[in-house]
Image: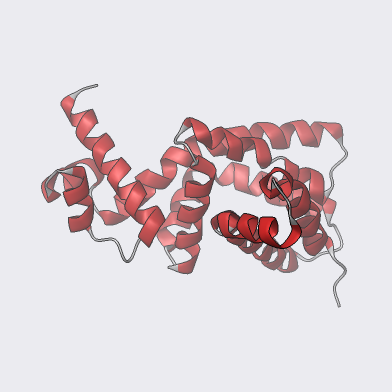
Amino acid sequence: MSKAAKTSERILRAAEKLFSEKGYEATSLREITQLAEVNLASVNYHFGSKKGLIQAVLERYQRVFMPALSAELKLLEATQNITTERILTCFIGPLAALEEVRQGGAEIYLKLLGYGYSEIQGHLRKFTMNRFGDVVQHAFRLFTLANPHFAAETLFWRLHFALGTVLFVQVSGKALNEIARADFSDPNPELFMTQRLLPYVAAGISAPEL
């Protein structure tokens, strides 16, 4: 690895750590450069700006997650047995594949994604759609096929409510597991987290409108 590549990698690792722990807005470039042991000029040279750095951190995960999700969605569509729960199941393998990026990659990615919404980092949506919009649109189209009675706006809200649930469970997983062990004498609650979560989220997405 060249010196420039090593410098870029140090910056990305430092930014990822701080962004996932503190969020984008609360993390300054000064903190990132101190942790990475580089100067501000190096950040500007490699990434152009803080926004560019945020996008680069997220893209490391999306480069693994999005192609894997696309493959799963295509396999599901070929079966012609499209249900909300089966679509959600398509996300499990791609999230697990994020361990290739970093240990605990799924949790880090979902934290980064959550901060993107909570801090209104609109540039991330545009960045993602420019690169992986076809995958996002494919997933939405399958959710539409599974729920043909819903208007697009209704499905938009329900999918984001579902995403909020997943983000909460992922970020709060350690605390929830400790509570489950203490209150229900469950020795390994994390083993059944996905099995418990998917039916709940699928039911929420597809529940009849009032």
Looking at the image, the residue that sits furthest to the top is 1
Q: Quadrant of residue 4?
A: top left
- Please count the marks in the image: 0
Q: Is residue 44 above or below residue 72?
A: below
Looking at the image, the residue that sits furthest to the bottom is 210
Instruction: Answer with left or right where residue 6 lies relative to residue 188.
Output: left
Give the percent coordinates (x, y) of residue 82. 84, 43
Instruction: Answer with left or right where residue 177 lies relative to residue 51.
Output: right
Give the percent coordinates (x, y) of residue 112. 45, 54
Which one is in front, 97 or 56? 97
The quadrant of the rendering that contains the C terminus is bottom right
Give the percent coordinates (x, y) of residue 5. 23, 29
- Give the residue drawn at x 83%, y 57%: 147
Instruction: Answer with left or right where residue 38 lies relative to residue 19.
Output: left
Give the percent coordinates (x, y) of residue 25. 33, 65
- Give the residue drawn at x 85%, y 73%: 209
Q: Quadrant of residue 81?
A: top right
The quadrant of the rendering that contains the N terminus is top left
Colour setting: secondary structure
Q: Quadrant of residue 150?
A: bottom right
Which one is in front, 52 or 117? 117
- Give the residue drawn at x 61%, y 63%: 164
Instruction: Answer with left or right where residue 57 lies relative to residue 186.
Output: left
Which one is in front, 138 or 43? 43
- Give the residue drawn at x 37%, y 45%: 57
